Image (cartoon, coloured by chain):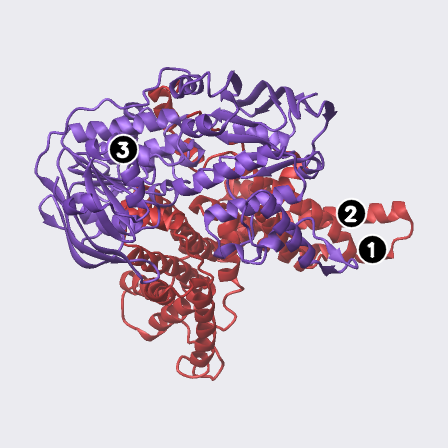
């Protein structure tokens, strides 16, 4: 055996190298990056078809030129929409240094803030689904859990008055997380007790959540003026903004990052997390090792639901301050893709969520400035998922050798 | 006359491994050639090259003297080469005839499947080679032994002259092995040629005309069973002296550690699988449970280790009643369990070696400190155990799925034996392992016994039971027919008991006594 223990120990020192070792194989990072790149390239071939100038162009050279312009305009608009215009940012920083005036600065960074605001519910819900995946459970019900959490949070947020913020805000957040946990815990319990498949039951719980929301918004939780919207939550339950208006990014983003780390720590550093991963990887061996699988199944779903629920909490308390039927644009469903994209690893989920946030953030500007339909972003998102789900495509395109398997001699 | 098959200088490298290194091999018409080697010696790679599943980096293949290129199994079949894989390639819900025709369906008028003519040919083949296969039965209703014969029919149906059998006996019971030997003999008698891949020495001695031994991708010996002995073959295979018979001290018996009284256990289909079993195992002895698989051994072990509900009866481990205890309580009572199916129950394949080393003790100090796992301690312990139990792995951080079967089993043995235990329950501890690993694991089990541990050993390999156990219990149809002291147990008597036939004179010694 030529692996000296010292060397092994040394390699495992660094935090990131350790993650890389554990999750292994640089491929886990390389493949998603190439997937995104390839999706953007494919997107570039689609953009011209929606561009009026390309469609009006005569002759090959002209079409090519117009296409190039269209793609360049669309992607540069997407970039400035996602991150902000570098020129404006530079100018704003100079103004701020000279005068101390922050208004330009806030404006310049606003696109980035928007993207991160969009990424926030993605991170929460993605973490929830990823935790479920690690435990071997397919929580397809993140969207329903998000609605359940939104309802509970909104209710605590508007109905309770007279509490100081440091009690009201945590209370509203807890109520939401608990509602999400309950919504996922029911299918978890059914799975543990009766073996009923969680995929079916989480989907069913989605429908219940949607219809319940419609019912509550048309009656018990309706705003006095009769619109199907809940009353506004009290300012004491607001998640504070990180900066001033018009930057919408709020503390939910920070909480999401902290939770991502907490989920990582929980899954890989605690005995309970070890049990969840073990049950997910091999239930038979877990039973043999003395783990009570039913307990772990319910717990995994409860935690998964609580995290997914936090997506709803963040939207209500940090952004909308009220609940409308359309308050989620499918975050819970996209979360499934995100967990896949992030290899069910909390840090991977964060990166995937940031990607989706920036894509979505850039989409609006791409449409308004370059006239490219927002749907293109949906196509790009879809392509990214396809490439990640079918890595053979990427391996073939870029001639990446399959991850080698070493066999030690017996 | 040129040989039926000749391989010259076959070389195949995989990243990091030279699986086949200039292998030369000839197969004569009508002979059984045994290809002997440990797991990972390159036997299966070589045969996959021959069957067109891999392309060799160098080397040539000649069939009846003419050079051939084999790019796919279709090419191989065209040259008369057929392969029976270790893991059967059958569709369980299809009939025998449907499975046989799969991939070379014959049709009437080009549209309608012609099951009848296929069935007729299967009957012909079956009669000619004494295979006893009926064409219209569904695969899922057949025993493993018959399924294997269906695989052979499949190959013969495609008119193979050269049959490659990859570890054909690994899945068979002793009786089925005998049956299988007869079939192979009838195949070669009628002019077929057979390459028989194995790592079992006894089978080579019994069946082969010639033996080619591989080690680390090279041919280390070509011999015949008359020239060779089991130990000379083992030496060629492993590359060092191997102890085939174990040196053992007389048992130093202590108190009864495991007591089972009138135990009843149901199987998954709620049929009674263990019917009133009683025995005890004392400290310092090995009680072997012999029996053909499927006679209640699995259910018995699962009941003893807390994985299956006990219907009635009583189990006591080290003075504690563990009849209805959980697996964790039973382990904490001082017992260790080497499960029958290491990949399904014993390991989490995607986890690193280090985590598998603490798979059932992770929650105890020093592996858990406060609320978090103490990875430095886990890794330290894992490293120690890897060294102490000679687990060959590139490192403790690699997934255990990357290890060979023998080393995976060593991980389990290391985990189970490196804590203080009073009882070891080992179920098929060496199934599918190579000679070197078997020798090692047997040694470890004996060492535990000599240290005063009680050992319950379940194995369907009679040789294993006979060489390890101090007393032998034979299980048949959910009952223990008899318990015999190992030094007085005769092979024939045990064989009869395993088939459920009890000789009248030994009936008196039934029960729990030594």
Mark toward the start of the polypeptide (1 vs 2): 1
User: Is B113 on the left or on the right of A296, as rendered?
Assistant: right
Residue B103 in the image: above or below residue B430: below
Whether pointer 3 and pointer 1 mark residues with C-beta atoms closer than 8 Å, the reply is: no
Secondary structure under tag 2 reads helix
Secondary structure under tag 1 reads helix
Crowding near the residue tagged with mark 2, few <14, some 14–19, many ≥20 C-alpha atoms within 10 Å: some
User: Is B104 on the left or on the right of B134, as rendered?
Assistant: right
Residues tagged by mark 3 and mark 2 found on one chain of the structure? no
Residue B320 in the image: above or below residue A141: above
Q: Chain of mark 2?
A: A
The mark total stands at 3
Question: Which callout, 3 or 1, points to the residue nearer the camera?
Answer: 3
Residue depicted at 46% across the width and 27% down the height: B204
Residue depicted at 45% across the width and 79% down the height: A217
Question: Which callout, 3 or 2, points to the residue nearer the camera?
Answer: 3
Whole-angstrom CA distance, mark 3 to mark 1, is 87 Å
Whole-angstrom CA distance, mark 3 to mark 2, is 82 Å
Chain B colour is purple
Whether pointer 1 and pointer 2 mark residues with C-beta atoms closer than 8 Å, the reply is: yes
Most foreground residue, B432 or B55:
B432
Most foreground residue, B489 or B87:
B489
Q: Position of residue B490 (x, y in %)?
A: 26, 34
> Which quarter of the rendered picture does the N terminus of chain B lie within?
top right
Crowding near the residue tagged with mark 3, few <14, some 14–19, many ≥20 C-alpha atoms within 10 Å: some
Residues tagged by mark 3 and mark 1 found on one chain of the structure? no
Quickly name the residue at label 1: A53
Residue A69: which numbered mark, if any?
2
Whether pointer 3 and pointer 2 mark residues with C-beta atoms closer than 8 Å, the reply is: no
């Amino acid at each position: 055996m030529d692996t000296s223990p010292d060397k092994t120990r040394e390699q495992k020192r660094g935090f990131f190298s350790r993650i890389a070792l554990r999750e292994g194989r640089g491929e886990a990072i390389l493949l998603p990056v190439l997937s995104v790149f390839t999706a953007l390239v494919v997107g570039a071939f689609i953009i011209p078809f929606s561009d009026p100038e390309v469609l009006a162009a005569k002759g090959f050279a002209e079409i090519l030129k117009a296409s190039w312009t269209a793609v360049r305009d669309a992607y540069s608009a997407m970039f400035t929409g996602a991150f902000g215009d570098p020129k404006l940012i530079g100018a704003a920083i100079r103004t701020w240094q000279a005068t101390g005036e922050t208004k330009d600065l806030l404006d310049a960074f606003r696109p980035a803030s928007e993207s991160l605001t969009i990424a926030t519910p993605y991170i929460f819900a993605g973490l929830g689904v990823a935790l479920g995946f690690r435990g071997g459970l397919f929580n397809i019900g993140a969207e329903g859990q998000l609605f359940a959490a939104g309802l509970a949070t909104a209710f605590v947020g508007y109905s309770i008055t007279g509490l100081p913020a440091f009690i009201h805000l945590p209370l509203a957040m807890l109520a939401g997380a608990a509602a999400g946990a309950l919504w996922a815990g029911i299918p978890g319990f059914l799975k543990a007790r009766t073996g009923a498949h969680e995929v079916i039951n989480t989907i069913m719980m989605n429908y219940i959540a949607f219809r319940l929301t419609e019912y509550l918004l048309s009656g018990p939780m309706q705003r006095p003026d009769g619109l199907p919207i809940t009353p506004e939550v009290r300012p004491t339950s607001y998640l504070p903004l990180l900066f001033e208006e018009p930057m919408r990014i709020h503390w939910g983003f920070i909480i999401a990052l902290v939770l991502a780390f907490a989920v990582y720590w929980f899954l890989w550093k605690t005995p309970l997390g070890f049990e969840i991963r073990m049950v997910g990887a091999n239930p038979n061996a877990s039973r043999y090792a003395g783990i009570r699988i039913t307990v772990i199944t319910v717990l995994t779903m409860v935690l998964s639901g609580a995290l997914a629920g936090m997506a709803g909490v963040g939207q209500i308390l940090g952004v909308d301050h009220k609940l409308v039927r359309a308050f989620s644009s499918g975050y819970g469903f996209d979360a499934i893709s995100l967990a896949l994209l992030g290899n069910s690893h909390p840090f991977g989920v964060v990166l995937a969520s940031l990607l989706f946030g920036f894509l979505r953030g850039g989409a609006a500007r791409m449409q308004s400035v370059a006239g490219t339909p927002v749907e293109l972003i949906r196509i790009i998102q879809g392509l990214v998922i396809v490439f990640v789900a079918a890595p053979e495509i990427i391996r073939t395109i870029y001639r990446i050798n399959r991850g080698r398997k070493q066999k030690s001699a017996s | 006359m040129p040989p039926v098959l000749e391989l010259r200088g076959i070389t195949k490298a995989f990243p990091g491994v030279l699986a086949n290194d200039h292998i030369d091999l000839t197969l004569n018409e009508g002979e059984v050639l045994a290809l002997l080697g440990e797991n990972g010696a390159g036997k299966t790679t070589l045969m996959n090259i021959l069957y067109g599943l891999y392309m060799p980096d160098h080397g040539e293949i000649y069939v009846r003297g003419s050079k051939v290129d084999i790019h796919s199994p279709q090419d191989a079949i065209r040259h008369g080469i057929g392969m029976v894989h270790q893991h059967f390639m059958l569709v369980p819900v299809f009939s025998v005839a449907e499975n046989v025709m799969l991939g070379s369906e014959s049709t009437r008028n080009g549209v309608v499947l012609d099951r009848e003519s296929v069935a007729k040919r299967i009957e012909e083949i079956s009669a000619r080679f004494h295979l006893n296969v009926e064409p219209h039965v569904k695969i899922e209703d057949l025993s493993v032994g018959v399924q294997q014969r269906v695989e052979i029919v499949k190959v013969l149906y495609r008119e193979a002259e050269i049959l490659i059998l990859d570890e054909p006996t690994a899945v068979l019971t002793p009786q089925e092995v005998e049956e299988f030997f007869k079939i192979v003999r009838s195949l070669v008698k009628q002019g077929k040629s057979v390459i028989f891949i194995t790592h079992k020495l006894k089978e080579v001695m019994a069946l082969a005309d010639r033996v080619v031994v591989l080690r680390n991708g090279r041919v280390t010996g070509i011999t015949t069973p008359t020239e060779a002995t089991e130990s000379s073959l083992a030496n060629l295979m492993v590359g060092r002296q191997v102890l085939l018979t174990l040196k053992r001290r007389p048992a130093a018996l202590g108190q009864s550690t495991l007591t089972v009284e009138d135990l009843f256990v149901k199987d998954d289909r709620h049929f009674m699988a263990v019917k009133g079993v009683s025995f005890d195992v004392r400290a310092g002895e090995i009680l072997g449970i012999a029996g053909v698989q499927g006679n209640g051994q699995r259910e018995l072990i699962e009941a003893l280790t807390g994985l299956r509900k006990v219907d009635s009866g009583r189990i006591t481990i080290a003075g504690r009643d563990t009849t209805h205890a959980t697996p964790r309580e039973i382990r904490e009572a001082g017992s260790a369990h080497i499960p029958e199916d290491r990949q399904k129950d014993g390991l989490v394949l995607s986890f690193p070696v280090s985590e598998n080393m603490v798979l059932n003790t992770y929650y105890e100090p020093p592996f858990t400190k406060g609320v978090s796992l103490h990875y430095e301690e886990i890794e330290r312990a894992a490293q120690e155990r890897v060294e102490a139990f000679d687990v060959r792995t590139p490192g403790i951080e690699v997934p255990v799925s990357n290890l060979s079967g023998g080393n995976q089993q060593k991980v389990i043995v290391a985990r189970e034996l490196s804590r203080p235990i009073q009882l070891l329950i080992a179920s098929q501890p060496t199934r599918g392992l190579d000679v070197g690993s078997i020798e090692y694991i047997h040694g470890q089990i004996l060492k535990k016994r000599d240290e005063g541990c009680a050992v319950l050993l379940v194995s369907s390999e009679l040789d294993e039971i006979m060489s390890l156990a101090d007393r032998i219990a034979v299980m048949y149809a959910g009952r223990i027919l008899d318990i015999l002291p190992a030094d007085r147990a005769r092979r024939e008597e045990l064989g009869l008991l395993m088939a459920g036939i009890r000789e009248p004179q030994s009936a008196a010694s039934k029960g729990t006594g030594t």
